[in-house]
Image (cartoon, grey):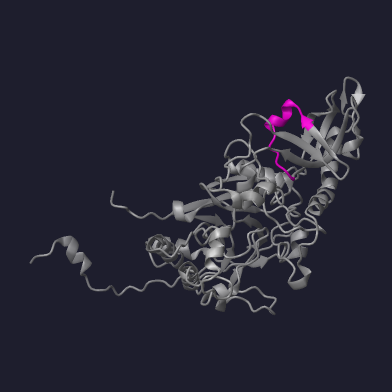
Amino acid sequence: MALSNGAESLLSPPRDEEHPILDRTPSSYNPLLTFNLAKGEKKHYQQQYADMYFARLAQLKPAVEQIAGDAWEDFEVAGETVSKVERVLDVRQGQLCWVVGTIYMEMPLKPNILDDITKDHWIVAPPPRVKFISPSGGDQVMLEDESGRLRLTGSSLSSILLVTGCIVAVLGTENANGDFEVLDLKVPDLPRQPERWERDDGEAALDGKAVKRERTRAGKIAIVSGLGISGDAGDALTLDMLMEYLLGESTSPKEQEQAARISRLIVAGNSLASASPIPGREEVAAKKSGHRKYGYDSSAYNAAPTGHLDVLLSTLLPSIPITLLPGESDPTQTTLPQQPIHPAMFSHSRAYMALPEQEETGWFDSVTNPWEGDVDGWRLLGTGGQPVDDVFKYVEGDDRLEMMEAMLRWRLGAPTAPDTLFSYPFQDGDPFVIADCPHVYFVGNQPRFDTAVVQGPTGQSVRMIAVPKFRQTGELVLLDAETLEAEVVRFEVFGGE
């Protein structure tokens, strides 16, 4: 049977031309251990959560006072000069003043610990609320410190993004009802931003000298989140497409050259699909008589999702270094900061991890959530998405970049912890306070990809990236390591419709 011209081209003999061997762009990696918790007996839960708020206020109060003092110096209203008040309870009626404190949102629809205690008596637990905002307008904004609490009012508050836990300075006066009428409000704003390569080549970077790294071409940092591996057959195709793209085993030679520029892969949380809900009291009682091994029901445990993730990582690791952040559905504790996923979960990939006694970082780095570190000289700060998702419940609208910018200007990576976001009860200081302004701030598991640049008062520039869920969108974010421009690569499967 005769073949068409197209079929003949498919059966042509192999060509003699040699294909170039592509080398992956090297990655400079210097992580920080900001959110690592103490080990063993040094980690305990005997302290009060209130200490965390007091520590946060002590850390951020000097910065807020500096900004407010510069802005409101010699400020006058109707001939009266504004004065600074040290404590919330020192505010006097009719006195024009400003004071620094912690915002507390009094919202009837927020979760209540008493409701959580009694939830075992419910027939069906109510679904989690999308927003805490009360439709009837019963929400109140409070300002508190170690002395007491003051209710804030004023039309200016409606245009300002505020959540529980942020530290602010408010200017105004107490009215006849005992409320504080706010005329203006100041936040800590962006902190000092380190120079590029500062931790790697500190003296040269701080002296303003150009630090050049030997690099044949500009590299790219790949960021993905929400892989949502469940062990089902439906996971395989898009994940295989992602793996082949990162390894340069698919697409055209030109696109393979682009893939070779990817110097590191960052997985920003929720690598596994959502875990099963915690069983109720009746279910636990029914299973007590059954065979249990090492504290769990071996018949109900499914190792397939973890095994699939391990195989995916171990296939990529010989070619590209990986940083793995845990997320809400990953096998680690639910409280922030989530600690690294244990190496025992990765029977194949852990060969690329550093040994516990080694100071150097391995090719595969399982890290905390939140996490910060230096990649190619830039300071990166990232989370699995829980802090932004919780802030979303406090405010109107759904602009995730606006919330991320507000968190940067509050200098807080998790402002609502520990009020409505589970957190370890820190006592000596709040690690969620952003000490150094990052160059890149990425948040995983967001509804859609979005990016913007926020500018600070002293020249800081931060690239914000909302990373979408890969399982829902099939999108991988690529960050240029020289220009900090972000782009998206989308993987789609034709459904035949």
> Which stretch did the figure color magenta?
152-165
Q: Quadrant of residue 342?
A: bottom right
Q: Position of residue 404 (x, y in %)?
A: 64, 46
Residue 363 included in the magenta stretch of the image: no
Res 373 quadrant in image: bottom right
Q: Position of residue 435 (x, y in %)?
A: 76, 54
As displayed, is residue 112 above or below residue 136? below
Residue 205, placed above or below residue 164: below
Residue depicted at 63% across the width and 47% down the height: 390
Q: Quadrant of the N terminus?
A: bottom left
Q: Is residue 286 left or right of residue 387?
A: left
Q: Residue at x 66, y 51 (%)?
A: 117
Residue 346 occupies quadrant: bottom right
- The location of residue 430, given as percent across then percent down, is 77, 55
Q: Does residue 65 sit above or below 13 in this rendering?
A: above
Q: Nearer the viewer, residue 21 or 350?
A: 350
The residue at 41%/66% (across/down) is 244
Looking at the image, which is closer to me, 173 or 188? 173
Question: 440 or 106: nearer the eye?
Answer: 106
Image spot of residue 226 (x, y percent): 51, 57
Q: Residue at x 91, y 23 (%)?
A: 80
Q: Is residue 118 left or right of residue 146?
A: left
